[in-house]
Amino acid sequence: MTTTMTLQDVGELEAGIIKALKNVYDPEIPVDIYELGLIYSLNVDPLVGHADIEMTLTAPGCPVAGSMPEWVENAARSVPGIESVTVDLVWEPPWSPEKMSMRAKLELNMI
């Protein structure tokens, strides 16, 4: 028996991961990391249940730099169908408030 994955399956897995990531917060900012714009890319391979996530932090000296990638990995792994996750922490391009969603800016009274 072969399993055929569709774009819908990929979309559902990505949506599930995004939903899980919206439960991860930067401890110093009361907005989730997805809305903050800290997730730069998300690629899912549903055939093997793997997700690659590229993310950054608000600053290189962020006190949770050692912990947050693990939080992101654990959140993504909680999605049914995801068996493995690779999280790459990158610094280019640097994060800036412009990367925040409108929702995040509203929550932080930046508009």
Image (cartoon, helix red, strand yellow):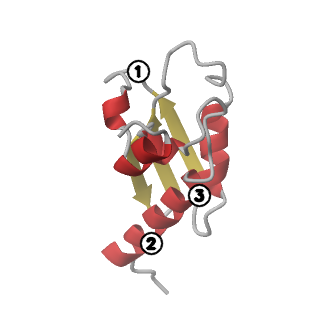
Q: Is residue 47 left or right of residue 6?
A: right
The answer to whether residue 20 shows anywhere in this view is yes
Amino acid type assigned to the residue bearing label 2 in the image: Glu
Please provide percent x and percent y for residue 87: 53, 38
Q: Which of 85/2 is in front?
A: 85
Residue occupying the point 36% across, 77% down: 8
The image quadrant that residue 14 belongs to is bottom left
Amino acid type assigned to the residue bearing label 3 in the image: Ala
How packed mark 1 is, by other alpha carbons closer than 10 Å (few <14, some 14-19, many 20 or more), is some
Q: Is residue 69 above or below residue 32?
A: above
Q: Is residue 30 above or below residue 76?
A: above
Labelled pair 2, 1 in contact (Cβ < 8 Å):
no
- C-alpha span from label 3 to label 1: 23 Å
Please provide percent x and percent y for residue 97: 37, 30
Element at badge 2?
A: helix
How packed mark 3 is, by other alpha carbons closer than 10 Å (few <14, some 14-19, many 20 or more), is some
Residue occupying the point 56% across, 48% down: 85
Element at badge 3?
A: helix
Name the N-terminal-most of marks 3 and 2.
2
Q: Which mark is residue 12?
A: 2
Q: Which mark is residue 20?
A: 3
Residue that protrudes farthest toward the top in the picture: 61
Q: Is residue 80 above or below residue 102?
A: below
Please provide percent x and percent y for residue 37: 41, 40
How packed mark 2 is, by other alpha carbons closer than 10 Å (few <14, some 14-19, many 20 or more), is few
Q: Is residue 77 above or below residue 64?
A: below
